[in-house]
Image: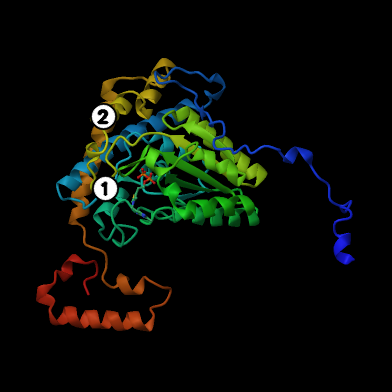
Amino acid sequence: MKHFMRFSKISKAFKEVPSQYVYQINPIKNFEPIKQFRVIDLEGNLIAKEYNNIPKETLNQIFDLMISIEEMDNILYMSQRQGKISFYMTSFGETATTVGTTAALQPQDFIFPQYREQGSFMWRGFTIEQIVNQCIGNHLDGGKGRQMPVHYGSKDLNIVTVSSPLTTQVPQASGAGYGFRVNGENKIAATWFGEGAASEGDFHSAMNFAQTLKCQTLFLCRNNHYAISTPTDDQFRGDTIAGKAPAYGMRTLKIDGNDLLAVYNGVKYAREEIIKNKEPFFIEFITYRIGDHSTSDHSVLYRSQEEIDSWKSGNNPINRLGLFLKKQGLRQFNDEHDNQIRKDVRNRVIAALKNGSEQQSPSIQDLFTDVYDEVLPHLQDQYTQLREHLTKYKDQYPINKFKGGL
Ligand SMILES: Cc1ncc(C[n+]2csc(CCOP(=O)(O)OP(=O)(O)O)c2C)c(N)n1
């Protein structure tokens, strides 16, 4: 009898929404692709006039830094070939997505970088000397020589240290953004990552956490077309990386990443929305990695020189911003001035390499004392053993090379 009742009537509490159903099998594969937000065209012409709002001084500061980084990257890349540093990663073609984004943030915002964001570090004041000392790994390196080159970090500048394992920084940024929201802070966590890194599970967990927990987190994907030798066609399908974000319920923008004005305005807008709505925001920048992945790569083995050259001369963020500044009369273009900037950077990098290579290596003692708050017994034992060994065989080791000796 009880069983029969079950089929007799439907509870009135259940309200059906008819529009949620269809009566035909109709699978969905693609949504309408998200269009790229753009302010200036390839020739630097202003298209979206209402976004021409960046102060002239800021634009010139941004441009100066973009050309400085290009020069610094050139020399540090070559210095690896000369054996002065062991490894390097350039950011040719991508400086709008680092300098332009960071210029639109507030200094109190936390940055969780991948590894190609020297522009973010330098906009906040990280110096050429700090970059070079980190790449050499001498005692002036804030990381005490424990990481490979380009793994910068700065507590003073609110920039979390670069990590080698891809995408680990992304869920960390969700966590930090959660903390900022819970504590009612006017602060966001901004994290950069490549389209390759977005294939890691950590990316998807981070997105889901951020939206469900309403984290004050800004996701900044640099889609530069390659993850080492893997082109985007082999990396993902669907509407690039931005197409995935609305599926997490996240507000999303896709931006022409070589258009400095679009990058700056998009990030400024996103930051304001994050603070106002107390929820995350996603931005994908479409850009191109003009340089090799790193000094351990030779990219013409998997892409043509013509392809590289077409981005280098055609859709290049420095060229486009330069043309815009010229057409708007916002910068006095004379070769002497720009050459002087490049020359000064070159001299500074060369001097920093010379000075950095003459510095002592980080302290041996720090290997044991600067691990935990207190020196744990097993580390004390290891330090004692090492000291005994080095004292016994002191002629065999260049102990004076290390800060503080034994
Ligand atoms: C977990 C993990 N897997 C693989 C690597 C090796 N690896 C280093 S960089 C890289 C490519 C990442 O490409 P992308 O995220 O698109 O950034 P891009 O280098 O293009 O800026 C890979 C596969 C790694 N460091 N960590």
Specify whether residue 120 is in view.
Answer: yes
Specify whether residue 183 is in view.
Answer: no
**Front-lying residue, 386 or 343:** 386
In percent of width and height, residue 104 lies at: 51, 37
Q: Amino acid at mark 2?
A: Gln
Give the Cα separation between the discs numbered 2 and 1: 25 Å
The answer to which image quadrant residue 286 occupies is top left
Q: Answer with mark 2 or mark 1, whichever residue precedes in sequence.
A: 1
Residue at disc 1, CB closer than 8 Å to ligand 1: no
Which residue, given by chain and number where applicable, does mark 2 sit on? 340
Other residues around mark 1 within 10 Å, as few (<14) / some (14–19) / many (≥20): many
Q: Residue at x 18, y 56 (%)?
A: 358
In percent of width and height, residue 47 lies at: 50, 18
Q: Residue at x 52, y 28 (%)?
A: 35
**Front-lying residue, 367 or 334:** 367
Question: Up-down: is 387 above or below 178?
Answer: below
Which residue, given by chain and number where applicable, does mark 1 sit on? 88
Q: Is residue 117 left or right of residue 25?
A: left
Q: Residue at x 19, y 45 (%)?
A: 79
Q: Amino acid at mark 1?
A: Tyr
Image quarter where the C terminus lies is bottom left
Q: Residue at x 19, y 54 (%)?
A: 357
